[in-house]
Amino acid sequence: MSTWLIILFKSIILFFIAIVIAKYMKRKTLSRSTPFDFISYSVIAIIISLMSLNLISNFYLGFVALAVWVFMPLILDYSEMKSKTVYNILHGKERVLIKNGKIMEDNLSKERITGQEFLQQMRSKNAFNLADVEFALMESNGDINISLKADKNPITSYDLGKKIGAKAEPQAVILDGNILNEGLTNAGLNQGWLTTQLEMQGVSVENVFLGQVDSSGDLYLDLYDDMIQVPKAQVKEMLYASIEKSISDLISFSLDTDNLEAKKMYSDNAKKLEKVIKKLEPYLLR
């Protein structure tokens, strides 16, 4: 058989083998790969290349070498899940870089991180002022995670004692001018609702590049024509404002009337609406 046919035949076989290997190897981006992962990937790629170009004359011996470099990482991955010791040997341990607001210079030296590199890493975590950082830890993959001081953390709804309704995954209902029925079904909506929303905003479905519905039922639209501004739906805000106005009106009526029965009726209904708006607030104001 001609040499080029042999190379073609081997390359086709190895192409599909590489797909299978890539499927079962640990899924990591190159930036998150450990040195051992990088070496494994490189050796596997080199072996496949040499076999494909017929530089390894014995195809079976090439498969033996390839099998070793494919299955050994898989075995070690399984061992890592079962043993913390094996994980630490292969990947190393986490290293504390800032503790109680104090930079651990010795640990920086052990990780061979210069001051400039450390500042760059902190800036990448939006920690421009190191005085705001309470704790910083370098993970075994080289990534640095930080914890800000208590008075520097962003205020959350929990800190304010406010309840916020849970959010579900937004659903795409229009893509490239086509209605996606699956997204509408997942959001508990139908084409009739979508048509009404588009008519209210004066938009035709053919002009929509992307339409997305969030967990609150708000429709976000992105049009092909970037010069056209789609008005933001404010149904929830208007509903909240209407209930607030109703409460104010009932309180005003209660103060204006001299009829004790009417005064009590207005006051009781105002309290009922206050309870309702308190329950709806997490869903209407988010």
Image (tube, rainbow, N blue to C red):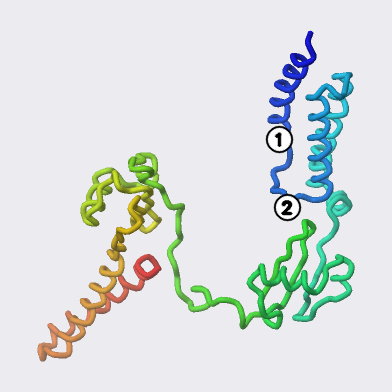
Q: Position of residue 254 (x, y in %)?
A: 17, 86
Residue at 76% in and 68% down: 137
Q: Position of residue 234 (x, y in %)?
A: 29, 65
Would residue 84 be found to the left or right of residue 264 on screen? right
Residue at 78% in and 76% down: 99
- Residue 215 circle label: none
In this orientation, which residue lies closer to the viewer: 159 or 272?
159
Q: Secondary structure at mark 2?
A: helix
Residue at 44% in and 67% down: 164
**Above or below, 249 relative to 34:** below
Q: How many badges with numbers are in the image?
A: 2
Quarter of the image that includes the C terminus: bottom left
**Above or below, 123 relative to 72:** below
**Above or below, 185 relative to 215:** above
Residue at 81% in and 40% down: 42
Disc 2 residue type (three-letter) = Arg
User: Which residue, given by chain and number where applicable, does mark 1 sit on?
Assistant: 22
Q: Which one is earlier in the sequence, the residue at label 2 or at label 1?
A: 1
- The 10 Å Cα crowd at callout 2, few under 14, some 14 to 19, many 20 or more, is some
Quarter holding residue 146: bottom right
User: Which residue, given by chain and number where applicable, does mark 2 sit on?
Assistant: 32
